[in-house]
Amino acid sequence: MAYAIIKTGGKQYKVSVGDKLNVEKLEVAEGETASFDQVLAAGEGAELKVGAPTLAGATVEAKVISQFKGEKVTAFKFKKRKGYHKTKGHRQPLTRVQVTAIKA
């Protein structure tokens, strides 16, 4: 399979074997294998299979490389002429994975 489109963490990703990507945190330990079963499409060119909404029996296997936090995002609230301002920060927990196999 050349590529697959998977859904995880409310987002969609186009992946191929060997790709490394950051996804929303998965409850899988480092070094273990994560399996994504929400495969929306898989294949290449004329042999592309598209699910409605997902492909039955298709999975994407990925090795968990690391668990980490993303860059800090600052939320700043402000109301003019009222003397009100509030700053709040947030770091999203992420998981870095490397795709090892696409099974369709």
Image: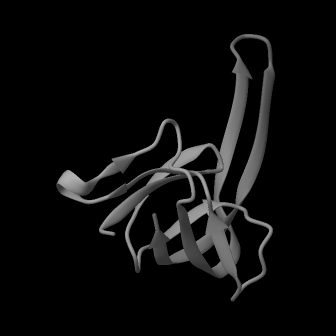
Q: Is residue 14 left or right of residue 61?
A: left
Seen as rendered, the residue at the extreme bottom is 31
Q: Quadrant of residue 47?
A: bottom left
Q: Quadrant of residue 64?
A: bottom right
Numbered label tally: 0
Image position, residue 26 (x, y; %): 74, 65
Quarter of the picture containing the C terminus is bottom left
Q: How is the image coloured?
A: one colour
Seen as rendered, the residue at the extreme left is 46
Q: Residue at point 57% right, 74% down?
A: 61
Q: Residue at point 46% right, 43% down?
A: 51
Q: Is residue 19 left or right of residue 2?
A: right
Q: Residue at point 71% right, 75% down?
A: 67
Seen as rendered, the residue at the extreme top is 81
- Position of residue 19 relative to residue 32, above or below, is above
- Position of residue 27 relative to residue 24, above or below, is below
Front position in the image: 10 or 86: 10
Q: Residue at point 77% right, 74% down?
A: 28
Front position in the image: 38 or 86: 38
Quarter of the picture containing the N terminus is bottom left
- Position of residue 72 relative to residue 17, above or below, is above
Image position, residue 32 (x, y; %): 71, 85
Image position, residue 60 (x, y; %): 53, 67
